[in-house]
Image (cartoon, rainbow, N blue to C red):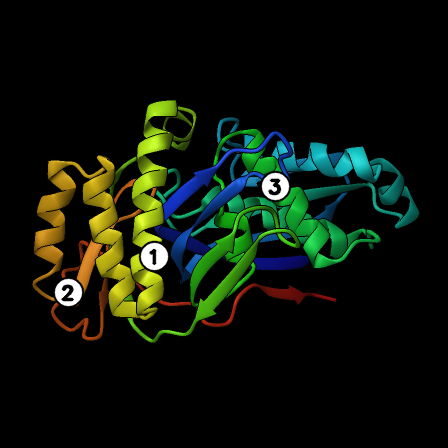
Amino acid sequence: MISIFVPSHITGFFSIYQKSNKLLRGSLGCGVLLDKGVKTKISQVDDEGIHIQINGKEDKYNETISKKTLEIINKNYSISNYLQQNNIKGLLINHEIEVPIGCGFGTSGASCLGIAIGLKEILNLPIDYTRGGQFAHLSEVSLNCGLGDVIAQMSKGIVLRIKPGAPGIGEVKSFKSDYYIVSKALGQISTSSIITDSEFVEQITDVGIDAQKKFVENPNSENFIKSSYEFSKNSGLLNSEIQDMISELNEFCIGSSMAMIGNTVFGLCDDISTVSKDYMISKINNHGINISKDI
């Protein structure tokens, strides 16, 4: 069995770059990686083919992104041929997801990466990690599940996206940070409904470019959360319920904002001793993706 941990990713602000070439399509912006995420476990089974589970169960809706990743990989490298070459009858892929799905934590990108990297390892696919990341990126943008999570999740810490596109094409800078991330999801927001709405795209991109300029002037943790909050207000995505939660979080955080794109509040804290158990507490992931094999 092989296990791939991919950190979840909360975007603080972003701007959208829609290109016909999906490898060039993506976003600029900045986000933070968490030590909670998606652990994709791939093991050999006696049943033929590829079988997908989410937290140990079949989940037809949330497995769509995983199936898309398999489809894209299969167009380039016949999975059935590689199963035969490695004397493997079938594989079970189980995504153990530690954060809320569809709430702005980048679970789609993490799942895509888990499959791409996991199949590279277990089937000895002749690709590097960058190419695996491109397969994951293609899967995300094809289904409008995200535009910049994958390239960020292949980095560490607080991640600034300085050139849009897939891994190997887009570019990022990363910053180490030792703050805790305190978050609470209130519900889902459809990423697709936002990034395919032309009016929203124009407004978000204008505000996102401005937020990025202000962050780059002083690229640190405190300015990240400040820039994120200003973006959430000015983009039109912030609702009154999240605003109330932000005010509550600011009582014990250095700053807080809305996760993009999800009905989720998050804040940066250095002292979590008074944080309510209603919130999820994570550390910032400064190490990146982890791969482990059981022989």
Give the residue number, with chain letter if any, for mark 1.
Answer: 213
Kindly tell me whether residue 48 is visible in this rendering: no
293 and 263: which is toward the camera: 263
Of pointers 1 and 3, the one earlier in the residue sequence? 3
Secondary structure, mark 2, is loop
242 and 216: which is toward the camera: 216
Q: Amino acid at mark 3?
A: Leu
Question: How far from the left and from the top, in percent, is residue 42?
Answer: 66, 50
Question: How far from the left and from the top, in percent, is residue 187?
Answer: 26, 36
Relative to 192, say whether 212 is above or below: below
Q: Amino acid at mark 1?
A: Lys
Give the residue number, with chain letter if any, for mark 3.
Answer: 24
Mark 3 or 2, closer to the camera:
3
In the rendered image, the quadrant that contains the C terminus is: bottom right
Give the residue number, with chain letter if any, for mark 2.
Answer: 275
Secondary structure, mark 3, is loop
247 and 98: which is toward the camera: 247
